[in-house]
C-alpha cells in the first residue's frame, strides 16, 4: 500500500540514524583530546540531532496507525515542536562552537591551561535550549514560519562563514608558530581549532543545502496544495532532516582525524573487525601543516624543542 511504501523505508532510515548518533556519543564522550568546553557543545549538538530523529520516529507511528498525519492531534503537534526544538538547538549550538573555537584560537595560552568551564558552558547550553523552545513556540504556536526559517538559515550561513575564517586563521597562525613558538600546548590548541573547524565547514555546507531544500519543498507544497499529498511532503521533509543528522555524525567523525581514529578503535572493539578502509582518506595531507604523522618539519621542530629544554635544565 501507499502507507507501507512511505513508512518502511523511513523506519529503516530512523533506526540507522539513531544507531549512528548513539555511536557518535560513545566516541565523543570519552575522547580526551578535545577541550572540555568544546566537548560539552558537541554533545549538545548530538542531543539536538537525536531530538530531530525522535520527532521523525514519533510521526511515523502516527502515519503507520492512521495512514496519514493527524495534524490537529496533540501527539503530532508535540512531534512538530520537538522537531523545531532540535532543529534550532543544533543551529544555535553550532554557532556557539565556532565562537568558542575562535576564542580558543585567540587566547591560546590561557585557554590551553584552563579546565572545563562548566558554569559558563552549561549556562550557554541552557540559553541555547531556551532559545530553541522559543523558536519552536514561534513556529508552531504563533505561526511565524517564514521569519523563523529565514533567521535559522541565516544563522547557518553565518556559522559557515565564521568556521571558514576561523579555520584559515588557525592554519596560518599554526604554520607561523611552528618555528616561532616553543609552547607545545598553544600549538596543539591551534591544531585542534583547525581540526574542529575543518569538520564544521562541510557539515555547515551540507546542513544549509539540505535545510534549504526541505524548506523550499514545504513552501512549494503550500503553493500547490492540491497536487502534493501532505503525508508525502512531510515524509520527505522529515527524511531530509534525519539524513542531515546522519551526515553530521559521519562528517564529524571522518573529518576530525582524532575522532576518526577513535571511531576505528571503537568499531574494532565492538565488531572485532578492521575498519580502516572505511575511514581512509584519498588525500592524507589535506592540512599539511598540521598532519599528525607525515609532517617532517613538525617532527624536527618537536625534537628541537626537546633539545632546547634539556639545555636549559639546571646541571647538577
Image: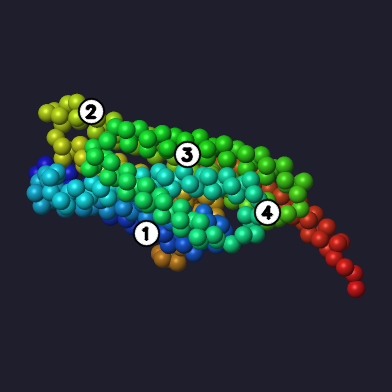
- In three-dimensional space, the C-alpha distance between marks 4 and 3, rounded to whole angstroms, equals 25 Å
- In three-dimensional space, the C-alpha distance between marks 4 and 2, rounded to whole angstroms, equals 51 Å
- In three-dimensional space, the C-alpha distance between marks 2 and 3, rounded to whole angstroms, equals 27 Å
Number of disc labels: 4
Horizontally, residue 238 falls left or right of residue 270, namely left
Q: Nearer the viewer, mark 1 or mark 2?
A: 2
- Mark 1 touching mark 2, by CB under 8 A? no
Residue 109 - label: 4
Question: At 41% across and 59% down in the image, what residue appears?
Answer: 25
Which of these two is toward me, 133 or 220?
133
Image quadrant in which you'd find residue 237: top left
Residue where numbered disc 1 is placed: 22
Residue 159 - label: 3
Give the colour scheme shown. Answer: rainbow
Horizontally, residue 288 falls left or right of residue 313, namely left
Horizontally, residue 55 falls left or right of residue 275, namely left
Residue where numbered disc 2 is placed: 220
* Residue 20 shows in this picture: no
Callout 2: helix, strand or loop? Answer: helix
In the displayed structure, would residue 261 be above or below residue 240? below
Badge 3: residue crowd in 10 Å (few <14, some 14–19, many ≥20): many
Q: Nearer the viewer, mark 4 or mark 2?
A: 4
Callout 1: helix, strand or loop? Answer: helix
Amino acid at each position: 500500500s501507499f502507507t507501507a511504501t512511505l513508512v518502511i523505508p523511513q523506519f529503516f532510515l530512523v533506526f540507522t540514524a539513531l544507531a549512528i548518533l548513539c555511536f557518535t556519543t560513545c566516541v565523543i564522550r570519552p575522547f580526551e583530546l578535545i577541550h572540555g568546553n568544546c566537548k560539552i557543545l558537541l554533545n549538545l549538538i548530538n542531543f539536538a540531532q537525536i531530538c530531530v530523529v525522535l520527532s521523525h520516529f514519533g510521526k511515523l507511528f502516527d502515519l503507520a496507525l492512521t495512514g496519514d498525519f493527524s495534524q490537529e492531534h496533540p501527539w503530532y503537534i508535540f512531534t512538530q515542536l520537538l522537531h523545531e526544538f532540535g532543529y534550532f538547538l543544533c543551529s544555535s549550538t553550532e554557532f556557539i562552537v565556532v565562537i568558542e573555537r575562535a576564542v580558543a584560537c585567540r587566547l591560546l595560552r590561557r585557554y590551553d591551561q584552563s579546565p572545563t568551564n562548566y558554569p559558563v558552558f552549561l549556562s550557554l547550553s541552557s540559553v541555547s535550549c531556551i532559545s530553541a523552545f522559543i523558536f519552536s513556540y514561534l513556529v508552531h504556536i504563533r505561526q511565524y514560519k517564514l521569519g523563523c526559517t529565514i533567521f535559522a538559515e541565516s544563522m547557518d550561513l553565518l556559522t559557515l562563514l565564521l568556521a571558514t575564517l576561523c579555520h584559515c586563521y588557525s592554519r596560518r597562525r599554526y604554520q607561523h608558530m611552528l618555528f616561532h613558538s616553543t609552547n607545545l600546548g598553544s600549538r596543539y590548541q591551534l591544531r585542534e581549532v583547525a581540526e574542529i573547524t575543518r569538520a564544521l565547514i562541510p557539515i555547515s555546507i551540507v546542513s544549509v543545502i539540505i535545510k534549504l531544500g526541505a524548506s523550499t519543498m514545504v513552501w512549494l507544497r503550500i503553493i500547490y496544495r492540491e497536487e502534493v499529498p501532505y503525508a508525502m511532503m512531510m515524509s520527505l521533509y522529515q527524511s531530509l532532516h534525519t539524513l542531515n543528522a546522519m551526515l553530521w555524525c559521519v562528517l564529524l567523525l571522518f573529518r576530525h582525524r582524532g575522532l576518526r581514529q577513535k571511531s576505528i578503535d571503537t568499531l574494532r572493539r565492538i565488531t572485532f573487525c578492521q575498519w580502516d578502509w572505511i575511514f581512509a582518506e584519498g588525500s592524507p595531507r589535506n592540512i599539511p601543516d598540521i598532519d599528525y604523522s607525515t609532517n617532517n618539519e613538525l617532527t624536527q621542530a618537536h625534537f628541537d624543542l626537546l633539545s632546547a629544554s634539556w639545555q636549559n635544565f639546571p646541571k647538577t
